[in-house]
Amino acid sequence: MWQVFLQADPFGQAIGTLLLTMSVATWVVMIWKYWLLRRGALALPRATAAFWLAPDIDEAERRLAQADTAALALPLLQAARSLDAVDTASLARQGERAAQVTRLLRGALDGRRAHLQFGQTLLASVAATAPFVGLLGTVWGVHHALAAVGFGDGFQIERVAGPVGEALVMTAAGLAVAIPAVLGHNALGRHIARLEAELEGFAHDLREWFAAGAHP
């Protein structure tokens, strides 16, 4: 692989460098997100259980902050408790209390969703474009092979072996980058959906509790 890279022209080396960069970025994102989602999957159920077992809201927030090591549920509670800090003369304090709490929780929930979804766009982009980047390298290698035959003194295997080998390697490299990105995107997406469902359930419970007249 390294020998093929050294034998390639600058354009071929640029394609190889791009594929390598895409591969490194893919694996870094997948490893980081797996660690993040794994930590969230372990901490979130314990954190919400500890919250509801607390005797009062202050103790509940303390327990939630201690157990929620992934910082997924705590921002929701903090958003709901911030309602009384909002200026009573503002539009945010007009309407029913349930609507006010819903607005605050929706903003916090959107922030947690964005946090969980971070990196998914990169994985999807790599999965979609890496095969075509590899195909571009393949076309470039075939072009070199045909040029070697056309401008040489007849067909000589030595002239076409290098460009053809480069073309095949580029095809394989594009697939090697794209396949892990596809699998990682789909697998991580399932974990994200599960965590989002748990957060939505917790947000709904908080809304009902605060809207019922409980005071932070």
Image (cartoon, rainbow, N blue to C red):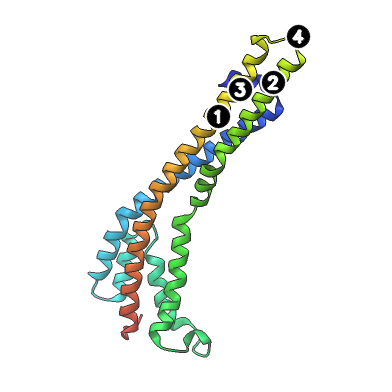
For marks 4 and 1, give the CA distance.
29 Å
Q: Tell me the CA gap for discs 1 and 3.
A: 9 Å
Q: Secondary structure at mark 2?
A: helix
Circle 4 sits on which residue?
153
- Mark 4 and mark 1 lie on one chain; the one further toward the N terminus is 4
Give the labeled residue for mark 1.
Answer: 171
Q: Residue at x 33, y 61 (%)?
A: 66
Residue type, numbered disc 1: Thr
Q: Amino acid at mark 3?
A: Glu
Q: Which quarter shows the C terminus?
A: bottom left
Residue shown at 46%/81% (left/top)? 85
The first of marks 1 and 2 along the sequence is: 2
Which badge, 1 or 3, is on the more N-terminal residue? 3
Q: Which residue is mark 3?
A: 166
Q: Is residue 135 above or below residue 55?
A: above
Which quadrant of the figure has residue 11? top right
